[in-house]
Image: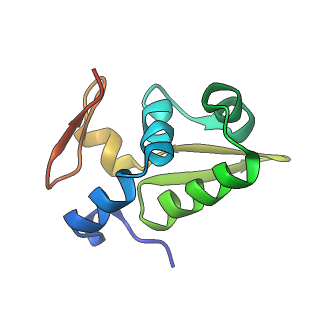
Amino acid sequence: MSLTVEDTNCADVLRILAQSTRLAVVRCLLDGAKHVGEMNRTLQVESSLLSHHLRTLREAGLVEARRDGKQVHYQLSPALRSRGDGMALDLGCCRLNFE
C-alpha cells in the first residue's frame, strides 16, 4: 500500500530522507521527472540499490512512478511539487532547501 505525504508523519519522512542516496534522488527529481537510467547516470548508484531507494520513497508517498513502455519515469509526488518552490520542498512539518 502506498501512502501519501500527508499520511506519513514528520519523523518518518525525515528518517527516510536522512539516507543520503534517497535525499540525492529527491534533489535529482526537483527539476522534473526522470527515468531510472537518467538517475543512474547522475547519481552513479548500482541499479538494484537505486531501485530499493526508489521503492522506499514511493511507499512513503514522496515519489510516483509512471511506466512508459519499458522505462519507468519517477517524479516527486504532486503534494511535494505543489508546496515547494525552486530548490526547496515543503514537507508540511519542515522545509528542505537544496540551494
56, above or below 43, in the image:
below
The answer to which image quadrant residue 41 occupies is top right
Q: Is residue 8 left or right of residue 32?
A: left
Colouring method of the image: rainbow
The answer to which image quadrant residue 93 occupies is bottom left
Q: Is residue 35 left or right of residue 2?
A: right
Q: How many marks?
A: 0
Q: Residue at x 56, y 35 (%)?
A: 33
Residue 51, given in percent of the width and then of the height, sits at 67, 54
30, above or below 99, in the image:
below
Name the residue at the right extreme: 70
Q: Is residue 62 left or right of residue 73?
A: left
Q: Residue at x 67, y 53 (%)?
A: 49
Along the viewing direction, whichever of 72 and 38 lies nearer the viewer: 38
Residue 17, given in percent of the width and then of the height, sits at 36, 52
Residue 48, given in percent of the width and then of the height, sits at 74, 54
